[in-house]
Image: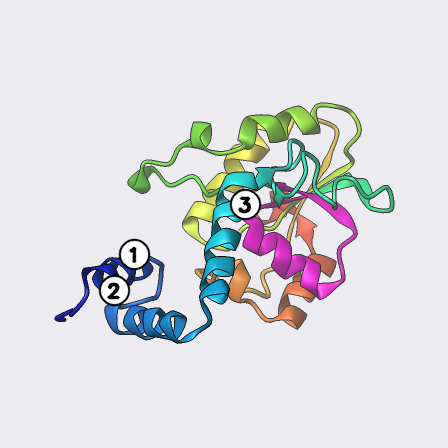
Amino acid sequence: MEFSSRLLENLVNEIATLPGIGKRTALRLALHLLRQPENRALQLSEAIRRFRTEIKRCHICHNISDTETCSICANPARDHATICVVEDIRDVMAIEHTGQYRGVYHVLGGLISPMDGIGPGDLFIDSLVKRLSSGDVNEVIFALSPTVEGDTTSYYIYKQAGHLPLRFSSIARGIGFGETLEYADEQTLARSIQNRVPFDQSLKF
């Protein structure tokens, strides 16, 4: 792809680094920005700058937040004795969208995947075990994608905290094996939360 402007080429190359965006789409977006009023493009760049420099992770659950404690953890109306363990913030958004869950969350920041070089120490597992050991939690819901990595992560956490007097459950397998949670339809995801099963009954190891 030939460019008449180095500035345009640089912008296209940067946009094309985003997931799911190729060079042609990146060029279309860049030219769209060029057609917009200058202040519109500056507003976009400022929004990106502020997001990258000011975003925080909740010090309790590790969800992204504008403040040190996210709105879910800070909400006294939520059931803080029930923790739903998820891979990342997209899963929090998916479950919240169902309107069927009133507990709180713990965002791991990924899944254990030795092939990708991701071990337990790379995730927010230690802080989860600490939360579970506090005595304030009654139930842990594993809402990880039904993949080998998801099952491995659930099992590892269960081995770390299974001795605690807690109820461990897993979302029902209305979600097919190998599917990621964020792409499940709302009704299937809602039923999976409502019909969760004891975790030890879902072990395949």
Queried whether the magenta region covers residue 86, the answer comes back as: yes
Quadrant for the N terminus in the image: bottom left
Q: Amino acid at mark 1?
A: Glu
User: In this rendering, is residue 65 above or below 175?
Assistant: above
Seen in the image, is 187 located left or right of residue 202? right
Q: Which residue is mark 2?
A: 8
Color style of the picture: rainbow
Queried whether the magenta region covers residue 39, the answer comes back as: no
Mark 3 or 1: the one toward you: 1
Q: Amino acid at mark 2?
A: Leu
Mark 2 or 1: the one toward you: 2
Q: Amino acid at mark 3?
A: Leu
Residue 157, position as x, y percentages in the image: 56, 34
| Quarter occupied by residue 25 | bottom left
In 3D space, how far apart are the residues under numbered discs 2 and 3 (Cα atoms)?
53 Å
In 3D space, how far apart are the residues under numbered discs 3 and 1 (Cα atoms)?
44 Å
User: SS at mark 2?
Assistant: helix
Q: Which residue is mark 3?
A: 203
Q: Which residue is mark 1?
A: 14
Residues in magenta, as a range: 84-106
Q: Residues within 10 Å of mark 1 (few under 14, many from 20)?
A: few
